[in-house]
Image (cartoon, rainbow, N blue to C red):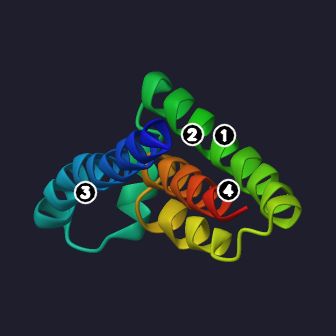
Amino acid sequence: MADKMNLKRFYMIACIIGTIVPWVFFTYFLLENGIDIQKFIVGLFANGAAGGFSADIMISIGVFWVWAYFDAKQKTIKQWWLILPAGCFVGLSLALPLYFYLRCRQLETI
């Protein structure tokens, strides 16, 4: 039981860090450019390194969402859908540990 509590705590801390770190960068962008979606998207693919990293993350979150959908159905994780806005407004750094937190919490009740 203590291991599961430590794991849940780890996932929650990862959610917090996974929200703060990207938003530090997003805030810097917003302060410099305002809400400029086109400039944001262009920035994601500003060079080969940024484009490769951006594509990698987008593909990974898509695969994760599909896996999470089926896993949530199998494990009856009712709030799994929270990973969708988490992934859109923050990224995989929040969505992934959030799902693992929800999954861990659900499996405790079984």
Left or right, 72 with respect to 11, comes to: right
Residue 44 image offset from top left, x and y in percent: 44, 44
User: What is the CA distance from the residue labelled 3 to the residue labelled 2?
Assistant: 16 Å
On the image, the x and y values in percent for residue 25 come to 22, 49
Tag 3 or tag 4, which sits nearer the N-term?
3
- Is there CB contact under 8 Å for labels 4 and 3? no
| Residue pointed to by mark 2 | 57
Badge 2: few (under 14), some or many (20 or more) residues near its Cα, within 10 Å? some
Q: Amino acid at mark 2?
A: Ile
Q: Mark 1 — residue?
A: 60
Label 3 packing within 10 angstroms: few (<14), some (14-19), many (20+): some
Badge 2 or badge 4: first in the primary sequence: 2
Q: Nearer the viewer, mark 4 or mark 3?
A: 4
Q: Amino acid at mark 4?
A: Leu
Residue on which the image places disc 4: 107
Is the C-beta separation of discs 1 and 4 under 8 Å? no
In the image, 5 versus 84, the foreground residue is 5
| First-in-chain label (1 vs 4) | 1
Give the Cα separation between the discs numbered 2 and 4.
28 Å
Which is more foreground, mark 2 or mark 4? 4
Q: x%, y% of residue 40?
A: 37, 57
Q: Is 104 left or right of 74, judged from the image as shown?
A: left
What is the crowding at mark 4: few (fewer than 14 residues within 10 Å), some, or many (at least 20)? few
Q: Are marks 1 and 2 in contact (CB under 8 Å)?
A: yes
Where the C terminus falls, by quadrant? bottom right
Residue to which mark 3 is pinned = 23
